[in-house]
């Protein structure tokens, strides 16, 4: 598969024997937990004991609701070489070696999720996510 893939010249310092096969504009997203607080309460009233001191009667409670939200981390260029995935963003650069990748799966949002051995798994939104999944799956199968 490596022989039939395009070899791109990119403005990166690649390692010895490393060849870039893919470069595209991308948005890096991550799943984050968002917590919101909901306050609910029943009837309540205050009794004035004396000036400046009141006593409150009634009940109220608060609940924390957690949900996972897809959040944009950065925009930049995604490069795929024969050894690693490189994201060159405006605020953050990320390098994922093939040894650290557990799986490459299409995400519900239309992007590509790269499951890693440690840390958060980034979700890259690119123009053709199916081609990126196919490319990465093939390269991962060939990597030693």
Image (cartoon, rainbow, N blue to C red):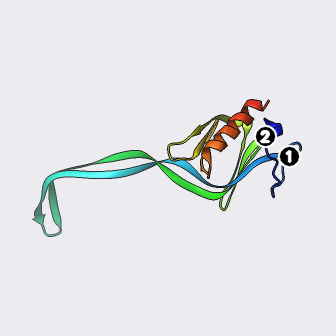
Give yes or no for contact between labels 2 and 1 (Cβ–Cβ under 8 Å): yes
Q: Is residue 111 above or below residue 49?
A: above
Judged left or right of residue 111, residue 21 is right
User: In the image, what residue occupies the spot 59% across and 44% down?
Assistant: 112
Instruction: Check the image and name the residue furthest to the bottom.
Output: 51
Residue 94 image offset from top left, x and y in percent: 69, 50
Residue 120 shows up from this direction: no
Q: Is residue 63 visible?
A: yes
Residue 43 percent across, percent down from the top left? 12, 53
Relative horizontal placement of residue 61, taking residue 91 as reference (left or right) = left
Q: Which mark is residue 15?
A: 1
Judging depth in this view, the residue of 69 and 112 nearest the camera is: 112
Q: Secondary structure at mark 2?
A: loop
Query: For the view shown, which residue lies furthest in the right direction?
Result: 16
Q: Quadrant of the C terminus?
A: top right
Horizontal arrangement in the rendering, residue 7 relative to residue 75 (left or right) = right
User: From the viewer's perspective, is 12 left or right of 25?
Assistant: right
Q: Which mark is residue 83?
A: 2
What element does badge 1 sit on?
loop
Count of picture labels: 2
Report x, y in % for residue 109.
51, 47
In the image, residue 68 lies at what x, y percent?
45, 45
Circle nearer the N terminus (2, 1): 1
């Amino acid at each position: 598969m490596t022989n039939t893939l395009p070899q791109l010249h990119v403005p990166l310092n690649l390692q010895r024997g490393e060849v870039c096969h893919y470069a595209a504009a991308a948005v890096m997203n991550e799943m984050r937990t968002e917590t919101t607080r909901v306050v609910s309460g029943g009837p309540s009233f205050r009794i004035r004991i004396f000036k400046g001191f009141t006593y409150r009667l009634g009940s109220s409670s608060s609940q924390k609701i957690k949900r996972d939200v897809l959040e944009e981390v950065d925009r930049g260029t995604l490069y795929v070489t024969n050894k690693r995935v490189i994201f060159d963003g405006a605020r953050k650069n990320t390098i994922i070696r093939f040894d650290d990748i557990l799986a490459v799966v299409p995400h519900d949002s239309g992007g590509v999720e790269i499951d890693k051995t440690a840390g958060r798994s980034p979700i890259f939104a690119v123009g053709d996510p199916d081609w990126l999944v196919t490319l990465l799956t093939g390269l991962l199968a060939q990597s030693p």
